[in-house]
Amino acid sequence: MKQRTAAVIRHIAFEDAASLGGPLAAAGFEMRYLDASSGRIDVDAAVEADLLVVLGGPIGVGNLNEFPVLHQELDAIDRRLADARPILGICLGAQLVAHALGAHIAAGEPEIGWAPLTLTAQGADSPLRHLDVPVLHWHNDRFELPAGATCLASTASTPNQAFAWQNTLAMQFHPEVTAAGLESWYIGHHRGIVASGLTVQQMREVSERHAPGLIARSRVMFAAWLESIELTQGA
């Protein structure tokens, strides 16, 4: 059987696929990182992969003029959306998908920390039903719901935390993180933590409490999503 590929667009080295790597491997995918930090990505590889995963990062749609690589990402996303080819967007990735679908992206107050999701009726009937634990929120920008998309989840400060559009799942929050992996985030995003009135020690203590449960539940959620779009092993 031909090896299936998952192209993973990574914007900054320490924000990687983390706990999602296990479900991808179990579903028979070879994961290939496309590093936007190099200034360009292989657009054709992103388009032709069986699955495209677009991860988060400390830039946004408002930085399109500063980072031409974001236009390359949007090109790949546009081409996949046109053919209803599956995309998983996380944080910045979700915002790029929303933007490609014509939704407005607005800057807002930071949402940093662990909190549960409030699922919509559609969300409770989706793979997100498995995320019945606090998840990590770490973003400033927010997306409006694209036309034709289905809102799956919200929090008090972010009405659109996740949406589905055909074979695409976009999540503003971070289902992929691990407690060990977040140590790099605390260094790379230290100023943002402090500006939000938090401390690294607070973040570490809460993350060590919640991350193990999230890892277990997000693996189930992601496997269920792959199954829902017929991308499981042998499908």
Image (tube, helix red, strand yellow):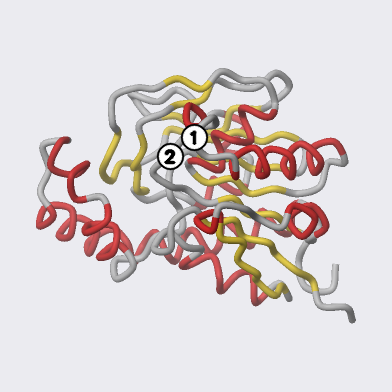
Reading the image, the residue beneath label 2 is: 59
Query: Image check: 39 left or right of 42?
Result: left
> Residue at position x 68%, y 38% from top?
74
Up/down of 1 relative to 116, above or below? below
> Which is nearer the N-term, disc 2 or disc 1?
2
Query: Image check: 197 left or right of 84?
Result: left
Q: Of tags 2 and 1, which is closer to the observer?
A: 1
Which amino acid lies under the numbered mark 2 shown in the image of this protein? Answer: Ile
Which amino acid lies under the numbered mark 1 shown in the image of this protein? Answer: Glu
The x and y percentages for residue 108 are: 34, 22
Reading the image, the residue beneath label 1 is: 66
> Residue at position x 59%, y 40% from top?
68
Up/down of 57 relative to 219, above or below? above
Q: CA distance from mark 2 to mark 1?
A: 10 Å
Total count of labels: 2
Question: Pointer 2 and pointer 1: residues touching (CB < 8 Å)?
Answer: yes
Helix, strand or loop at label 1? It is loop
Binning the other alpha carbons within 10 Å of mark 2 as few (below 14), some (14 to 19) or many (20 upward) gives some
The x and y percentages for residue 51 are: 73, 58
The x and y percentages for residue 210 are: 28, 58
- Point out the image quarter for the C terminus: bottom right
